[in-house]
Amino acid sequence: MEEIWSADRFTSRIKRILITKEEIDAAVRRLGAAISAEYAGRPVLLVSVLKGAFVFLSDLSRAIAIPCEIGFMCAKSYYDGTVSAGKVTVTMDLDQDVSRYHIIVVEDIIDTGRTLREIVEMLKARRPLSLKVVTLLDKPSRRLVDFQADTALFTIPDSFVVGYGLDCAEHYRNLPYIAEYEECERC
Ligand code: IMP
Ligand code: MG
């Protein structure tokens, strides 16, 4: 069996570290403090679309000093390469009644923007008290639909990245930094 499980093989295709653990930690701490100040005294629900944002959500939630609830969604996207709307199915939905909360959607990366735009439209139709989107990474050069996060911690060039929750064929999510990846033939 090919040994992706060996430590050497694991990192051999990583070209370079783009964002260090320390840079991520500092940015997440600042965002957590800003959210704590802005939403104090209000019911907050952090919403993540699995799986990529699980590390960011986990660290961000612990950098927030006010009470907040956590919710997860799973979505499947179906696109033929050109169509840009109406192709997202929710396979696991939130438990919470969205209309009772200020929603903060926590995303790993906005690439084409298609998945998140659909999810945000879905959530807005449930009439939350307010809705904002925060993303760890933004790749604006790849955008296919008009979609902007309210906060993007890092803007990156058009290259494939792994780590801090982001995967290539389900690997590398556990790297503590964001790295440029050589190729991803299974993505
Ligand atoms: P979208 O194209 O903006 O809809 O992005 C959908 C999803 O693609 C993101 O939430 C990520 O899970 C994944 N994705 C986009 N770019 C990358 C990347 O560079 N590395 C790993 N996953 C990515
Ligand atoms: Mg994602």
Image (cartoon, rainbow, N blue to C red):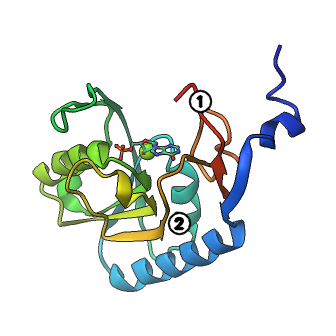
Three-letter amino acid code at disc 1? Ala
15 vs 119, left or right, is right
Residue 65 shows in the view: no
| Mark 2 lies on residue | 60
Q: Residue at x 64, y 45 (%)?
A: 181
Mark 2 vs mark 1, CA separation in Å? 25 Å
Earlier sequence position, callout 2 versus callout 1: 2
Q: Where does the image place residue 89, in percent across and percent down from the top left?
A: 26, 29
Residue at the extreme top: 1
- Position of residue 121 in the picture relative to residue 17 (left or right): left
Residue at image coords 22%, 32%: 82
Pointer 1 residue: 169
For ligand 2, the image quadrant comes to top left
Residue 38 in percent (x, y) is at 34, 83
In the figure, is residue 99 to the left or right of 137?
A: left
Picture coordinates of residue 97 (x, y %)?
23, 50
